[in-house]
Amino acid sequence: MIENTLQIAPDGLWEKVCNLVRNHLATESERSQMERYFPMFVSHELVENVVHIGVAEAIQVEWFTPLYEKPIERAFEELGYPGVSVVFEVSQSRKQSAQLIPAFSPAQTFLQKQTSPQHVFTGVPSTLPLEENYTFENFVTGPSNSFAHAAASAVAKGLGRTSYNPLFIYGGTGLGKTHLMQSIGHYVLDRNPSASVCYITSETFLNEYVNAIANGAMPAFRERYRKVDVLLLDDVQFIADKKQFQEEFFNTFSSLMTYKKQVVMTSDVAPKNLKGCEERLTGRFQQGMVVEIEAPSYETRLAILKFKVKSLESKHVIPEEILKFIAENIRSHVRALEGAISRVITFMDLNKDMPMTLEIIQHLLKDSIEEEKTIKDLTVEDIMKAVSSTYGVTLSDIVSPQRTQTLVTPRQVAMYLSYKLSTRSLQEIGRSFGKTHATVYHGAQTIQKRIDVESDLRKTIENITSQLGRNPSELYK
Ligand code: ADP
Ligand code: MG
């Protein structure tokens, strides 16, 4: 052994590190995950401020690093070892180093757990339960999601026989990807209860893969996912940068395709934008059907709210103006709409005699509305871009000092929309245009007056507003 090598295990330091890491984990499931994973470390040693943690497979390096690198470093720091960095690496001598494990006790308890029956691979695909109300019937459609909805329903009806294989649904969080994907599962199971429908997140999938490797159970793992009728794989962005796992996934995927089994995937980005993902794989993802779910328009948000009120079977009548207020102010995603409506209903349950007013609602939803502003606030740049593309001028035209009429109108429209749709002050808007706040005010006023008499201009401005995802009625308040 090299002289400056300090074994962690003998003085109990590693045990303390493990305890600290565990204490810092936020949820029970993270802690039980840790109890499964830490025993997979085949060695650990501290050499000159670097903790080398040996693992058996390269995939485990990819998998454990983002999970435990920082928590372990932090634990060392708290134990009086500042500036320590953690490196996961494939252990060169698995057998020899494996003998190190019994030297520290947490691993021993972990090891016993690891061999318990729950980790025996059976070849039966593990599927997460489907959410009961994630059905097509409960999915409200609008321009933002109707294409995705149509594709999903075609897939559910034609299972593996449509050219929509794989179906790849992408879009931001809380826009209904999981809901739509599970609707396919429900549809299939309703008609054929013996169908093998597997819904799984790619995180769980990867998890099982790592476990299968550690347990020498790869054949069973392979078999279990290759005989399903429908594989619903949620959040595939998770496989980014996990090269070895991608390889395995590619094989599973190809085999399902060969047997005309249906694969549905969701992701927060389009296939071509999946980071660190081989082209071979993203290429295959695009061979079926790729659909995007976008943020719902004002009308769809209102329709979703009405649907939710109905399905919550609340005995309260929520005035239309309140629903409109929510739809106008909560724009980013459907989950936030659901949160808002259930907050309103709970409030009404608790305050039966109090009439609902806009002031109360405003107060009740203050936090969500604030949050909304930071998520979805339009920047002056967003607005300038939309305006300049509509008028066919460049961004630098918009901020230039030139006063030709072809530039003045788009510039003033951009000022007007920034004033109406962004939360920036006149001063801030002025800075973006390289003008004073008085110029912005004057520009906005000019447009305000013109749209009263020029219906073409009004139409153009309303279109730009819609393009920016906002309700044109916001302009007239
Ligand atoms: P994602 O997977 O895209 O993050 P989810 O599918 O989890 O989003 O949807 C978030 C919540 O919003 C869920 O409760 C879902 O039922 C609801 N939801 C999303 N889109 C719709 C829709 N079009 N109609 C009804 N509910 C929806
Ligand atoms: Mg989801």
Image: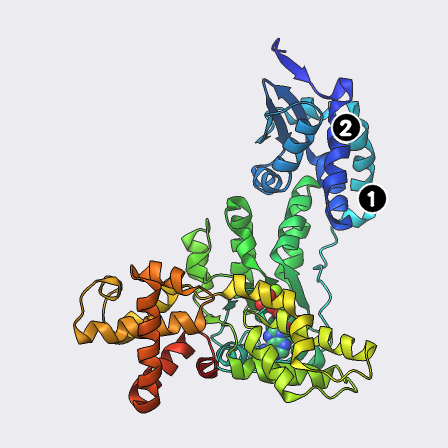
Q: For residue 287, what is the image quadrant? A: bottom left
**Where does ligand 1 appear, by image quarter?**
bottom right
Name the spot of residue 15 as percent of width and height, x first: 77, 28
Name the spot of residue 215 as percent of width and height, x first: 71, 41
Of residue 328 and residue 242, the one placed in the foreground of this image is 328
Q: Is residue 36 left or right of residue 219?
A: right
User: Which residue is denoted by mark 2 in the rendering?
Assistant: 16
User: Which residue is denoted by mark 1 in the rendering?
Assistant: 116
Number of marks drawn = 2
The nearer-to-camera label among 2 and 1 is 2
Location of residue 193 with respect to 434 vertically, above or below = below
Amino acid under label 1? Ser
Q: For residue 94, what is the image quadrant? A: top right
Amino acid under label 2? Lys
Of residue 362 and residue 169, the one placed in the foreground of this image is 362
Q: For residue 137, what is the image quadrant? A: bottom right
Name the spot of residue 236 as percent of width and height, x first: 55, 58
- Within-10-Å neighbours for mark 2: few <14, some 14–19, many 20+: some
Location of residue 406 with respect to 114 vertically, above or below = below
Tell me which residue sits at (43%, 64%) in the image: 425
Residue 185 seen by the camera:
no
Location of residue 290 with respect to 85 vertically, above or below = below
Of residue 125 and residue 470, the one placed in the foreground of this image is 470
Q: Which quarter of the figure is the N terminus placed in? A: top right
